[in-house]
Amino acid sequence: MKRLIVTSLVPITFLAQTLSAEDSEPRDRLHSVRKAVDTVGKIETKEVSVANTVKHMFEDGKVSGQLRTSYGAYNQKMPSVADTYATAIGGILKYELASLYGFNAAAAVYTSHDINAFSGDNEHHNNDLSSSSGSYTEMSEAYINYKYQDFNFRVGRQTLDTPLADSDDIRMIQNTFEAYVASYDYQGFSLMAGHINEWQGYDADLDEGWSKAGINGTNFGGIAYNDVLEFNLWYYDITKQTNALYSDFGIQYSINKDMIVHAMVQYLKENEIDSSGYETEIYGAMFEYVIHGLGLNIAYNQADSRHGKQSFSGTGGGTLYTSMDTMILDEIAQDRKANAIVSGISYNYNDFTFLYAYGSFKGDADSSGVKEHIVEQNIGFEYNFNDEFTVAAIYVMEEDKQNSQKTLNDWDRTQVMLNYNF
């Protein structure tokens, strides 16, 4: 795996799926800022048609996709570090065959290209959107799928959304995985098992393209239940790097159509393999109260990474409740105990969502005596003009509270994103 410590940079909504006053049914709640951003650019999965001949598989195939443009800029506070900015245009074009006897296939191209007139040059170029070269194109999905009743098996390049391997659609290019995945749904329970060979996307480093997900890939399996009660139990063998056990449990209860209580606890245990250095225990909890579209949220995580060890919260955005726009606990959970507390407020009315979130990330002294204290604030909005067109923006302020001098953790960031789905 080329990059284990990953950063996130875009939550457009802290509690993006809050219940509006006009909703009659509660929506699934989101566990963190990091998870919320996925809803901004997600393409709605189209129902696969059923064909009775090979010819009709192609005739009834469907084209879908997304046009996306994004502007991202960093205003650095450290004098020796240059400000950066970029504007990119790109998207996804996908073609999916109809199903014949349960079999079908699909392929999708993901692409992003900087608009040079509105992007910085050299040290002023922001690499987040389209790589350091300013251009990225990849066959990010290409799979064969078999479905029989509640059983599904997919082989090839595909999206995944599990606790420690997820799409994390936070820039122009979301993560996808070359994998073999079997799943089965039974009376509210979802079971999944598979093997991941490689992954690509923003978190995997656009300059690297497809990267190994472990020396010999990642084996994983899990069970999930999501209703009034929520439950997850997952195991990951990231070969020759770490074994990870993840679990969470909680409740999402609708008191009435305008009021929701959501509470969760989580636990992540990692054991290093072959002296990789990835070993930790992480505990977490979150509580959310929503009334008439106004959401109040608080979350806490604590990591215990012993001498010379560090944490790893996933290939993607990770699953920790305190993951914010940029800061995740991994950034300071190295050779020390560390904790994070994040609180936020959001308001959702019809097609408009506003958020404010404040996070404090503290690390005890490591073996060399160095402490960490980083504060991040997120201010954002999202507006859905219709089912196809969305505009979203985020303003991020990050500050190093531990050091009197400005560091690489002192900056402001602005991002604006427009999505059109078809």
Image: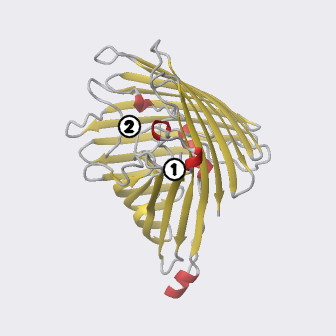
Q: Position of residue 388 (x, y in %)?
A: 69, 58
Q: Position of residue 215 (x, y in %)?
A: 25, 49
What's the mark number on residue 5?
Answer: 2
Residue farthest along the top direction in this orientation: 404
What residue is disc 1 on?
A: 225
Helix, strand or loop at mark 2? loop
Q: How many numbered badges does the structure rendering display?
A: 2
Any part of residue 53 in sight:
no
Q: Position of residue 113 (x, y in %)?
A: 52, 54
Mark 2 vs 1, N-terminal side: 2
Q: Position of residue 405 (x, y in %)?
A: 46, 14
Q: Nearer the viewer, residue 276 or 202?
A: 202
Please tell me which residue is depicted at 48% across the width and 80% down the height of the picture: 101
| Amino acid on which disc 1 is placed | Tyr
Tell me the quadrant of the picture where the C terminus can be found: bottom right
Q: Residue 201, relative to residue 184: is it above or below?
A: above
- In the image, is 247 to the left or to the right of 70? left
Bin the neighbour count of mark 2 within 10 Å (Cα to Cα): few under 14, some 14-19, many 20 and up. Answer: many
Q: Residue 22, relative to residue 151: is it above or below?
A: above
* Spatial CA span between label 2 and label 1: 28 Å
